[in-house]
Image (cartoon, rainbow, N blue to C red):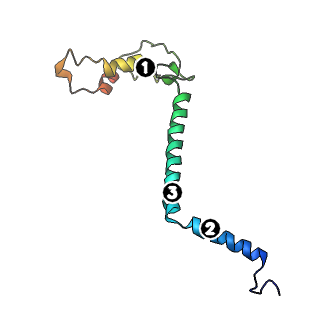
Amino acid sequence: MVENSPSPLPERAIYGFVLYLASHCGFSEYWAVAIPVYLMVVLGIAYIFLFGVNLINAAPLDSTETVTDTYAKNQVIKVSDPDAIPALRDIAISDVNRMFFLSDQRRDPGNHFSSPADRLHRKF
C-alpha cells in the first residue's frame, strides 16, 4: 500500500528531481535549435571526411588502372574483308582519344557534321 500513497519517498524525490532537470534542459529553445545544428555539422564533417578517404584510396588519374583492368588484353588486328563486320574486341584508349580529341576537323572544316562515333566506326 506504500507504493500508491502520495507521501514523499526518497525514490519519488529522485525521480522528481531527474524529471525537473530533464524538463528544464531538454525542452529549452537552445536544445531545440542546437541538436539539429550539431547533427548537420556532424553530417557535413562526415561527408567531407568520406570524400577525402575516397580520394586517398582512388588510383591517380595518370595510373593505368583507371584506363584498363585485368580482363583487357592487347589484341592483334587481323586483316579481313573490308565489307565484313569487324570482330568484337577492346578498342585501345589511344585510338579512342585520337578519334575524339585529335580529330581531323581542324584540317577539314567541311567535316563538322560527322560525330566522333561515326569517325570511330569508319576506322574500324
Mark 1 highlights which residue? 93
- Residue 27: horizontal and vertical position, in percent? 55, 67
Asked if 1 appears above or below 29 in the picture, the reply is: below
Say whether residue 76 is visible. Answer: yes
Which residue is located at x 40 percent, y 16 percent? 94
- Residue 11: horizontal and vertical position, in percent? 77, 74
Query: How far apart in space, not on screen, are marks 1 and 2 (Cα)?
Result: 65 Å
Q: Residue furthest left?
A: 110
Asked if 1 appears above or below 31 in the picture, the reply is: below
Q: Earlier in the sequence, mark 1 or mark 2?
A: 2
Q: Secondary structure at mark 2?
A: helix
Mark 2 highlights which residue? 22
- Local packing at callout 3 (Cα closer than 10 Å; few below 14, some 14-19, many 20+) is few
Please name the amino acid that badge 3 sits on: Ala
Q: Is disc 3 in contact with disc 2, using a CB cutoff of under 8 Å?
A: no
Residue closer to the observer: 120 or 9: 9
Q: Earlier in the sequence, mark 3 or mark 2?
A: 2
Say whether residue 124 is visible. Answer: no
Mark 3 highlights which residue? 34
Locate residue 66 relative to residue 81 in the image: left or right: right
Which residue is located at x 77 percent, y 86 percent? 4
Which residue is located at x 80 percent, y 83 percent? 3
Please name the amino acid that badge 2 sits on: Ala
- Residue 60: horizontal and vertical position, in percent? 50, 23
